[in-house]
Structures are given as structure tokens and as C-alpha cells.
Amino acid sequence: MADPGRAAARAEFSFAERVAACDVCGAAAFSSVDAEANVVSCDACGYRFVNPRPSQSEIAAAYSDPHFYDGWIADDTGRHEMWRKRLALVRQHTQRPGPDLRPDSRQGSRAGLAHGTRLLDVGAGIGAFLAMAREQGWTVAGTEVSTSARNLARERYGLDLLFGQAEDLPLPSQAFDVVTLWHVLEHVPSPARLLRACAQALVPGGFLVVAVPNEDDAAFFPNRVKRSILGAFGRHPAPRVRYERLRPGSEIHLSHFTLPVLRRLLTTTGFDVRWVSIDDHYTMPNVKTNVQVALYRTVRRVTGANMGQAMVLVAELHDGS
């Protein structure tokens, strides 16, 4: 008898869903970037996305595989360090005027968010980031499309995550100080719709923290340099693959963002970008990855070039004034 698990692993998505208009600018003319991976680019704004693509029901089923998060649990110690760094980043860069601070206060004119901060994590996975924020006194909530992830969040952390796409859920209006999207925006069918839902859930002047893979050409430069150096010594490593055809059991990236495209999308959905850097996305951090991230962040500050594999942005919602 055939193993149903192995059969599912070999299953292919249907790629039956077509996108008629660019989610960033609304244009309808696209050019193929990678035919095998179904990646196209908007002729008007440069936004790159998968078209045609799998349906959301197919994607949700793939992420709900009971074994999909086995690797997350196996990397628990490393992921804890990754979340610790990310929470420190959120605390440092989500700042707004404190109600009791005077311009001449020794504390400065802006105060960081602290105890009691209301945090929504969209695509919370198994809930490790939310649990860590809760330990620091924050009030937390999260959304998730994977049934297996929701079950793990409840079992491991006592978190009851909202089930479904955040943009389809009845999120309370102006209920959160911070919304985080840790490598979520590239997975959703309409990034613009999700960002508008985040804006609706934030208080005026609230903060959005979004991390996505980096599609800028500079991100592929280190691999080209490495291959050139090794090639001089007779070694020829494979080039870094830019796009892969989507399959169940793998990460489902429907969008590929450059910084200019993501800035434009955030601006059109009501946000002002306040800070941009390299995202330290390594789930098993070590001395090498720490040095690499520090180096790439320095290069970006000096030259503006983002050579990291992922980027993180902090944006502030217009306060309406």
C-alpha cells in the first residue's frame, strides 16, 4: 500500500489562480521573469510575483501538514535567540511621544513602548515570539492559517491564535500599538489588502514591523563574489537559486519584494517608513551569522546597498493630523 505522506509530498499545486492586476499599482501588463517558477514583473512598478499561482486553500492545506513545523521545534534553541533579537529590535524602533514627557526631559522627547504594549503578530506560527513578548508584560494576540501551528501554540504556550487570513478576520479597530509581520507579507495573496487590515487594527501613530526576503540585486552579489573566488581555485559551487517552483512542503512565496517596491506599497497603504535594515533571520545563529549580519548592516548604513538575504522595515501609521 502506498504511503499517503509520501504521495502528498510529491503532490503538485494546480497553479490555476491568475492575477489580473498588480497589487502595488493596479497595472495589468506583466513580463515573465522566470517561466519555470511562474514569476512575472509588473511593467509599471517592478513588483515581482507568482502568476499563475496556487489557490489559498491549497496553500493552507500545505501549511497545515502536521509535520510542517517539526523543523521549527528541532531548532527551538536557535529560534529563541532569533526571536529575542527581533523583540529587542521592536522595542528599540517602535517609539512615539510619551504623554508625560517635556521637550527638556532628561528622558528625551520620545518614549519606547514598554509594559502593556498591545501587540498583534500576523502569521504567528507556533507562537514563540508572542510568548516572549507576553513574558515582558505586553498584551498579545496573533493570527495563523495553519491548524497544526495553532494547536502547537496552544499546547506549548497557552496561546489561542485567531484562525484565518488576518485580512479576512474581524480584527478590532485601533486596538494595537504594534503589528508585526515576520516573513508573512511574501506569502499572502494580496499584500496591499493585508497592510490595509493592519492599518485598520493599529492606533493612529502605531507601528508596523515587516520583514521579508530581499529581492534587491545586491543580495545576490556576495554569492557571485564567492563563486568567482572559488572558481579561481578550480571549485565551482552552484549559484544561489533566485526563484523555485512552488511545491507543497516548501515555503510558499507569492511575492518577491525590492525595497523601492515595498516602500511604495507601505506608503500607498497609509504608512511612513521610519527605519530599514537587514533582518537577522537565522534560526541557528552563530559567530559567523552574527558577523555577517553586522557587516551587511554596516554596508547598508554606509552605501545604502542591502546585501542581506532579508530586510526589515519599521513603518508608522499616519496619525491623521
Image (cartoon, rainbow, N blue to C red):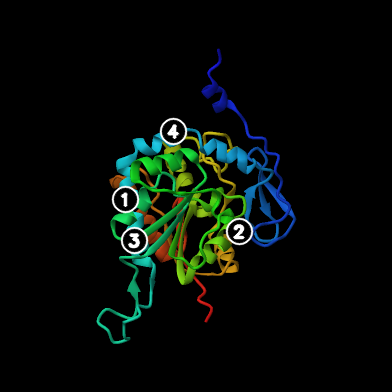
Residue linked to disc 1: 290
Q: Earlier in the sequence, mark 1 or mark 2?
A: 2
Disc 1 versus disc 4: distance between alpha carbons? 26 Å
In the shown orientation, is residue 81 left or right of residue 25? left
- Identify residue for label 4: 235
In the image, taking residue 162 as reference, residue 55 lies left or right, namely right
Kind of residue indicated by mark 1? Asn
- Point out the tag, 3 or 1, that comes first from the N-terminus: 3
Distance between the Cα atoms at labels 1 and 2? 34 Å
The quarter in which the N terminus is drawn is top right
The span from disc 4 to disc 2 (Cα, nearest Å) is 46 Å
The answer to whether the residue labelled 1 contacts the one labelled 4, judged by CB atoms less than 8 Å apart, is no
Q: Amino acid at mark 2?
A: Arg
The x, y position of residue 16, in whole percent, is 71, 39
Q: Amino acid at mark 4?
A: Arg
- Label placed on residue 193: 2
| Element under disc 1 | helix
Q: Nearer the viewer, mark 1 or mark 2?
A: 2
Vertical comparison of 192 with 55: above or below: below
Q: Residue furthest top?
A: 1
Q: Position of residue 291 (x, y in %)?
A: 31, 51
> Upstream in the sequence, badge 1 or badge 4?
4
Q: In the rendered image, which residue does mark 3 sit on?
A: 138
Q: Secondary structure at mark 3?
A: loop
Residue type at tag 3: Trp
